[in-house]
Amino acid sequence: MRCPKCSSTDSSVIDSRGDDDVIRRRRECEKCNFRFTTFERLEFTLPMIVKKDGRREPFDRNKLRSGLVKACEKRPISVEVIDKTVTEIERKIHELYLSEMPSERIGDLLMEALSKIDKIAYVRFASVYREFSDVSQFVDTLKGLLGSDKIKSERKKGLVRLKQAANS
């Protein structure tokens, strides 16, 4: 591993931690004693992405992350949540074992994840992704979100009533 400060290739690992997705290594340069962090991640063979105009390009994790960051801008969402979401979507794409995948499917996966993370970020992303041309499309998306929230709320109320009845 090359030191980002002096470019020396002599470094030692001070600390190493990992989970299922990534290994974090804290390193120290032997030459200048600069400490830095590296991340190791298993590299998957991911599909080519078929754009709306028919072009094909390799899957780019950074593009996915960039879109998520833009949607979550000025929202109380941590970098860890964003990175975890990108990793989850990347894993889902890999598990499909496709050689090509339409970009719309990636957008759908991202919208699904955003709907669970933050409703405002979801609407921001949807307005760009679905290319809203008028306010009615925006309102329809909001109604859909409110409808799903009401359904969840009613289910929750029903479960509370069942628990109360069981305890009586």
Image (cartoon, rainbow, N blue to C red):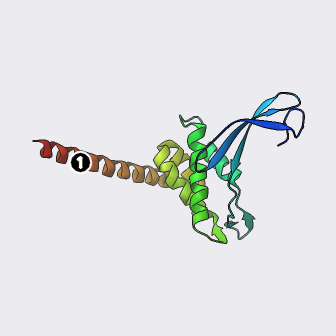
Q: Is residue 71 visible?
A: no
Q: Is residue 78 visible?
A: yes
On the picture, is 14 further left or further right than 146?
right
- Image coordinates of residue 20 in percent, x first then y, are 58, 50
Kind of residue at badge 1 = Leu
On the picture, is 39 further left or further right than 34?
left
Q: Residues within 10 Å of mark 1 (few under 14, many from 20)?
A: few
Considering the image in quadrants, where does the N terminus appear?
Answer: top right
The residue lying at 60 percent from left, 51 percent from top is 87
The count of marks equals 1
The residue lying at 44 percent from left, 49 percent from top is 142
On the picture, is 50 further left or further right than 121?
right
Considering the image in quadrants, where does the C terminus appear?
Answer: top left
Q: Quadrant of residue 30?
A: top right
The residue lying at 61 percent from left, 45 percent from top is 83
- Image coordinates of residue 2 in percent, x first then y, are 85, 41
The residue lying at 49 percent from left, 45 percent from top is 117
- Image coordinates of residue 78 in percent, x first then y, are 57, 36
In the displayed structure, 30 sits above or below 45; it is above
Residue labelled with disc 1: 159
Q: Secondary structure at mark 1?
A: helix
Q: Quadrant of residue 80?
A: top right
Return the residue nearer the eye: 63 or 92: 92
Return the residue nearer the eye: 126 or 161: 161
Q: Quadrant of residue 72?
A: top right
